[in-house]
Amino acid sequence: MSYALLSVNVPSNNLNNINNLNLSYNYQYSSISDNELITLSENETDYNVSDIEQYNQEEGIKNTPISKSYLCSKDSYGITKKEYSCLSALAYAKDLNESDDTKKYYNYLQKKSWNIKLHVKGTLHYLVGYNKKNNVKVIAFRGTYSFKDCIYDIQLFTESSVPTLAAIVPYFTKQTLSKVSYALSFVGSKLTTHELIELAENVVKEETINNSEIPIILTGHSLGGGMANILGSKMGLVSFGVSPPGTYLGRKSFEMNQKDITKYAQAIIPERDLVSSLGMSGGSQIHIPCYEHTLDCHGIDNSICVIGALCHDTELSSLCHEKWKKWNLSISS
């Protein structure tokens, strides 16, 4: 049984040359059997998808490597990775006017035709964003915010991360890790309640029933991104996680299959992000550089500003000016 994984690698060197940056793409093809876990890679430097070109032409975007890149272009729903990331960041807010940064995220999204409402259901915090221009709805789940959320992180993703952590032990071969992971996924399904996942699934079902004609996409950062990838794969919905823990090795626990993960799950993976390094992520991945200390690479604000810099998005300058200055980047449209 095999699957395809699209991974976009963004180099972190030559920061002063960011305006001339050309992104590269790494297509990974993996085949998993009962006895082995094999990964093969083939590098490509050009990416051409008809729906992305159509959106770019409609918006009058120049025919450049940046405008055609998977990181910077709109998807088939007309949404950019920057918008998904900003929606994921805004899901942390208790009020849309609670801080200057919150207001800046909100204003940025309003300019992109987003109508946003924050919600709380039990222990689940999320937002629902509706884009009037594209007639599409996005549900963004809040990421790790408190000690209780950290417990959920451990409960939800321990089985995925244990094989990764165990990889440093020489006694574990790829064959052993694949079998251990498979066994752990069934154990996890009996030992964890997955309370947040159940709450989130009910929210998605309600939104789907109430607006069956409107496409729904799931997103989130950290824990929220992991939840989005899990539910999207289970429910047949496109999902976009920012710095999510890998859930592929624990897919049996979450009632996901390999084919659906490949088809529906997408993720932004910053380099040196400790949370994203846990487990193994499936689906399409975009790897971006981190210009901060390792402990700060998981922050949603850093990821947004890196994406903004790589995509030359001057609309994010009010949010990212200080970081771009610190990173010695000069951003122009």
Image (spheres, rainbow, N blue to C red):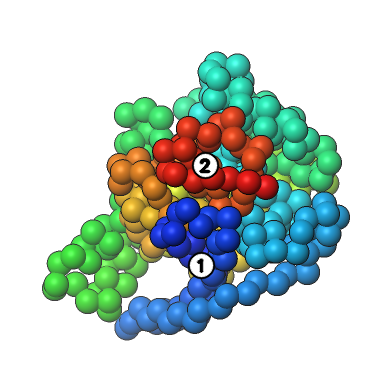
**Nearest-to-viewer mark from 2 and 1:** 2
Residue 32, position as x, y percentages in the image: 41, 79
Which is nearer the eye, 144 or 13? 13
Identify the disc placed on residue 7: 1
Mark closer to the chain start, 2 or 1: 1
Residue 298: image quadrant is top left
Number of residues whose C-alpha sits closer than 10 Å to that of mark 1, classed few (under 14), some (14–19) or many (20 or more): many
Q: Which residue sits at x=71%, y=49%? A: 79
Q: Which residue sits at x=69%, y=34%? A: 109
User: From this viewpoint, is residue 64 visible?
Assistant: yes
- Residue that label 2 marks: 305
Q: Is residue 170 above or below residue 241?
A: below
Q: Which residue sits at x=53%, y=18%? A: 99
Disc 2 marks a residue whose amino acid type is: Cys
Q: Is residue 146 above or below residue 268?
A: above
Disc 1 marks a residue whose amino acid type is: Ser
